Each structure stands twice: as C-alpha cells, then as structure tokens.
Amino acid sequence: MTTLNDLYTLVFLTALAIVAAAVARKNRDITHPVVVFFGPIYLQYLLYFFLYSDEHRITSITNVLLLLGAASFMLGAAFNHILFHIAHMGKIKPNVMNIGIYKMHRARKPMLYIGVTGFFLGLYYAYDMGTSGPSSFFFNLRYAATIEGANLGAAPYLLLFLHMWIIFSICIAPAIRRLKSYQVGLILMLLIISSLFTMARTGLFFTAISSAGAFYLSQRYLYRKTPESFVNIIIFFFTLTGLFILVAVLTQKAEISDVFDSFLAYLAFPIISFDKFIAPNPGIHNGHNIFYPFWKIGELFGLLPTWTRVIPGLTTTDFNAFTYLNAPYLDFGKQGVGILSFAIGATVSFIYGNARSGKPFYIALYSLLLFPLFMAFYEYQFSLVSWIYYMIILVGSYALTPKRPMEIRQTAPLKRKTTVPSA
C-alpha cells in the first residue's frame, strides 16, 4: 500500500517535471541539462511508485534527499541563467566558431592513430579474457572484468582518443569536404565494439549518448540546422534499449523471456538500493567519492594511501547502483546532496549556455557531460578518473593547435548574438 510520504514525493516531483517540460518547450531543446538530468529520475520514481513500492518501500529520508537533489539542481541551473545573462550580453567574436572547427580538424589525426592502436590492444586483451573463462565468450569478458579484476592494460586510456576523434569529427563534418559520413560511421563502429571488450552497458551508453549529443548540438547551434525529430528521438531510445537487452542476454544476466523485467529493474532499483544501503550511512567516506580522481592520482604518485570503497552490508549479489545521490551523501550527508546538486546544475548549465552560443569547445564538452547527466538516475558518474584524461585531451588539442579561421558551410547564417538558455 502506498504511503503518504511516497504520494507527497510524487506530487512534488510531478511539479518539478512540469517545470522541466516548460524549460524544454521554451528552449525547444531536449538536451537542456534540466531535462536530461530530471527526466530519467522522474521516470525512475514513477516505476518505483507504481510497480515496486508495495514490495520495496523506501524511507522518508530517501524521498527527502531525492527532492532536495532535484530542486537544488534546478536552482543551480536558474542561478547560472541569471549570471550567464548578465555576463554574456555582448556579441560573439567573429571567428570564434571557425577557429574552433580548425583546431578540432588539426587535432583529429594524432587522435585517430592513438585511438586505433588502443582498439587493437584492447582486442588482444579481450580475446584472451573471453577464451579463458568458465562459460561463453561474452560471459567470460564480463566475469573477468567484474569478478576476477582483469583489465585491458593501457587500451582504455588510448581509446579515449578514439572517442574524442568521433566527437570532433561529428562536430566538424559539415565544414570539412574531405571528411565523409561513412568514415565517421566506421570509426564509431570500432568504438562501439571496443565498449564490448568488458561488456559494460555504461560504456555503450556513453558512446551512444555523447555521439548523438555531438550531432544534435553541432547541427543546431554551430550550423543552425534543425535536426530534432520526434521519430528520431524514439528511434534513438529504442536503440539504447536494444543495446541494453543485447548486453544483458550475452552476459547471461537475463533470459530473453524476462529481459523486460530486467530492464525495468535497471531503471527503478537504484533508488531502492540507495535506501537500503546508502541512506543509513551519511558522511562515512569523507569526500573520497567526489574527489576520487584526485585521490587516485595521489595514490599513483605515492602521496596518498590506497582507498577502497566499502559500503556496510553490501554483498556481491546485491544490486550495486545507487543513483547519483550516493556520492555526495556518503561523503557529506544531506548537506553534500544539496550543495553538490546545486554546483552541478550551475556548472553544466554554464557549459550548455556556451554550447548554445555555437562554441565548438563547449559543444564537445557538453556532449560528453550528457552521459553523467542522463545516468544520474543510476549512478554518480562525475568522479570517473577518465574525466581528467578527457579534459587533458580536449584542452590540449585546443592549446597546442594554432588559430586559423575556416570557412563554414551553412544552410543559414550564424547568429552573432548569444542565445541565453532558460532555466
């Protein structure tokens, strides 16, 4: 039977969903950070409320934290909107978009060589892992990565260059006559195949979401086309669902007969697991989750002791995803949830605003950030060590290539006045 706490939470979340829908309508953009962040979270709570609340009741503290995080994120986005509007009342510099495209073009060649090297290195390790386990090839890949702790050596780091090559190529393809769409598609297939080396669904989603985001944002805000189509959106999400089902079946996590139930559990259970394992343990990790990339670098240089994430009561058979709320809550309790959600909302909205202004650097960066925003319903993805490497690649490619304007082929003239996103 549904409790009043759950019902009140659903009412407040529905009110926030109406705000998110109004933001999407006003901006005519489904990639607005409020929409990308809050949409999956609201869907998750609907599934919990109508399908799982009778069997898996969550406590009032989890409901409060969910509302606190969502509201704080939206307040952060609104706060940035006010500051962005004040700070960007002028016009964009004439060649900022052209120079950005040229820098992306010059940086792609070494990225491709490094990334393809990483692909074949990862393929070698994956073949060894897949042929030496206890079951089928694909099951062995996931078993080796999650149970045995095997890794792909340097391949994952080199493959980041291949990912950035894809993002850059999608952004500049309409402006570079020699770059054909089939070439980008071929390299994209290599990247998708490489995400199957460990059979991790999040890797597939990262590739798919960031690539789709780069195409949408560059077409709309760099070349001023209108790529959005309701049919294309539906096809994209059906493709994501198909990838989820494929990996679940190949790794024997679900039978074909119950794959739909497995998919619904993937969406709904993170908040249930948060309530069971995370809610009773506020502030026990003292910042290790949020600042994990910097701690990891300190470990590598011998400056900091090794830290292992331990959650009381959690076993290897339990559902081990806990929504984005787990990192700030385990580190700093309720205050951490409110402050970090506000900071994330303000930061990604600032990046999104610059992407809407047609700046290639921010379009590439926001395309990558669409993944942790979208996956906030599942897990906290902002503290992956790979973010440091992505930033080094992205900033380095801009810092090390010379400035040189390029002609951009457009279907409509670029608007010079900054477009300010609504929050």
Image (cartoon, grey):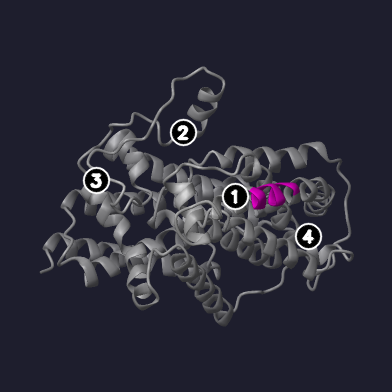
The residue under label 2 is: 292
Secondary structure category for the residue under label 4: helix
Q: Secondary structure at mark 3?
A: helix
Query: 317 or 323: which is nearer to us?
Result: 317
Mark nearer the viewer, 4 or 1: 1
Closer-to-camera residue (50/139):
139
Determine whether 175 is above or below 242 in the image: above
Q: Which residue is mark 4?
A: 172
The crowding category of the residue bearing disc 2, from other C-alpha atoms within 10 Å (few below 14, some 14 to 19, many at least 20), is: some
Mark 4 to mark 3 CA distance (whole Å): 45 Å
Neighbours of disc 3 within 10 Å: few (<14), some (14-19), many (20+) = some
Pointers 4 and 2 in contact (C-beta within 8 Å): no
For badge 4, the amino acid type reads Ile
First of labels 4, 3 by sequence position: 4
Q: Which residue occupies the foreground of this view, 220 or 282? A: 282
Residue 375 position in % (x across, y down):
45, 56
Q: Amino acid at mark 2?
A: Tyr
Asked if marks 2 and 3 touch (Cβ < 8 Å), the reply is no
Front-most of 350 and 332? 332
Question: What stretch of residues is rendered in magenta?
Answer: 117-124
Q: Residue furthest bottom?
A: 231
Q: CA distance from mark 2 to mark 3?
A: 20 Å
Question: What amino acid type should be assigned to the residue bearing mark 3?
Answer: Phe
Q: Amino acid at mark 1?
A: Asp
| Residue 215, image x, y percentages | 67, 65
Q: Is residue 417 magenta?
A: no
Residue at label 3? 277
In contact (CB < 8 Å): disc 2 and disc 1: no
- Circle 1 residue: 128
Q: From the viewer's perspective, tell me whether residue 211 is left or right of residue 316.
A: right
Q: Earlier in the sequence, mark 4 or mark 2?
A: 4
